[in-house]
Amino acid sequence: MSLDLDAIRADTDGLDVVHFNSAGSSLPPRPVIDAVVEYLQYEARVGGYEAAADRIEELDDFYDATASYLGCDPSEVAFCAGAGDAWWRAFSAIPLQAGDRILLSRSEYQANAFGFMQAEERGVELTLIPHDRQGMIDLDVLAAELDERVRIVSLTHVAMSNGAIQPAAAVGQLLADHPAIYLLDSCQAAGQIPLDVDELGCDFLVYTGRKWMRGPRATGVLYARSSVLDQLGPQPYIDGRSAEWLDTGGYELMPGARRFEYGEQFYAGRCGLAVATRYLLDLGAEHIAARTQALAARLREGLSSLPEVDVHDEGGPRGGAVTFTIRGEATPAIGATLRANGVVLSVPGRRNAQFDLGPRGLDAVIRAAPHYFNTADEIDRAIAVVATI
Ligand SMILES: Cc1ncc(COP(=O)(O)O)c(C=O)c1O
């Protein structure tokens, strides 16, 4: 079965420009927008609490749909406000003490890096695992560093500054017999490739709604393996959805991943992300991955053929995001120039990805991220626009 591109594009507003920013914030399909708007209108008619009670089946389909995508139990899924928010809810529940070690990767996102820096201020030791020559996390170094003091192994599945897809399942296999908690940031992977938490072997996995998932902004997912919960403390902020205030005094955390949720949340967004996830499941994550990677490969090839362009994605496999610079052009300013010429993308800077861009001597990269709703013609148009700069 191949994707019905005409139907997909008919569902997508905003295609009057070449939208290559699915790694930043994608274009949600019509059913997602309709679900969010319709829910907000219903809230306006009956009130927020009443809407949540009346629409509980749609709201709870978020857990079922997400569990189908990730291959987990719905009770292992929490609705969050984004990937950073989901990551912090997980990270801050992991008890750490001075002398513990965290192994992290060069693909790490800035918000995660800040969390690790805060742990370091409390005496936790950080070890940055290098990349091998293919730009993948060096599994031999990782295996050699895995001692009994390691409490967390963290990997960002796809960096925001590099199209390479890291070998997340191989890291999971290395950790199979080690008690360290495996924290996987799949923010740039979810929605562009299939994800199976058992194959990945992760304890936590986070992603955002608005990128490759094509969900609403301010939505995100935290997957928490049920077997990891016993090793955790409560995250610093809990409320009446995360815990129960007992008659006998004290509190008890809710079972499953519900302990990571807050009562006040973006209910319309939860419906929207449920619909976005069903949309993805209907199309098939494998089909999405195949089409997205084929479009990105065409873009890499076309850009590489331009004499002034350097494509920077490392190794392989490589996903939908294509990162490059144009020699002699100030990279941060290029985003606006390209947008003025009808090509929308983003330009991540070194401050977003010090571990990745810093050692490669890059201050910023231009990131073009075509998704399955884009076309070969749009790829060729974008290459032609870059060629004129
Ligand atoms: C790899 C990665 N992790 C985490 C995040 C944070 O996501 P959010 O903005 O939803 O918190 C991003 C956002 O760009 C990202 O690229």
Image (cartoon, rainbow, N blue to C red):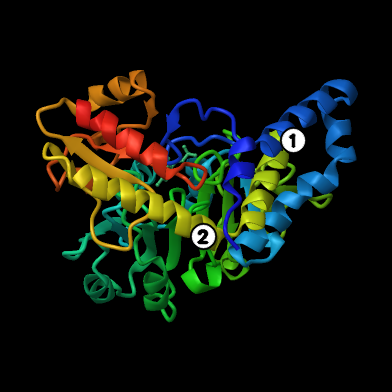
User: Which quadrant of the view contains residue 67?
Assistant: bottom right
Q: Quadrant of the C terminus?
A: top left
Q: Secondary structure at mark 2?
A: strand
Ligand 1 within 8 A of label 2's CB? no
Please name the residue shown 24% across and 26% down the image: 332
Q: Secondary structure at mark 1?
A: helix
From mark 1 to mark 2, how far is it between C-alphas? Answer: 28 Å
Q: Residue 143 or 275: which is nearer the viewer?
A: 275
Whole-percent x, y for residue 54 in the image: 90, 39
Instruction: Specify the label residue 35 is tagged with.
Output: 1
Q: Residue 115 or 384: which is nearer the viewer?
A: 384
Say if residue 344 shows up in the picture: yes
Q: Is residue 68 above or below residue 46?
A: below
Please name the residue shown 57% across and 59% down the image: 2
Ligand 1 lies in quarter: top left
Density class for disc 2 (Cα within 10 Å; few <14, some 14-19, many ≥20) is many
Q: Residue furthest bottom?
A: 177
What residue sits right under mark 2 in the picture?
204
Q: Is residue 61 above or below residue 15?
A: below
Q: Is residue 259 above or below residue 363?
A: below
Q: Quadrant of the N terminus?
A: bottom right
Q: Residue 35 or 169: which is nearer the viewer?
A: 35
Density class for disc 1 (Cα within 10 Å; few <14, some 14-19, many ≥20) is many
Say if residue 250 shows up in the picture: no
Q: Looking at numbered disc 1 in the image, what kind of residue is underneath it?
A: Ala
Whole-percent x, y for residue 226 in the image: 62, 67
Whole-percent x, y for residue 328 in the image: 9, 28
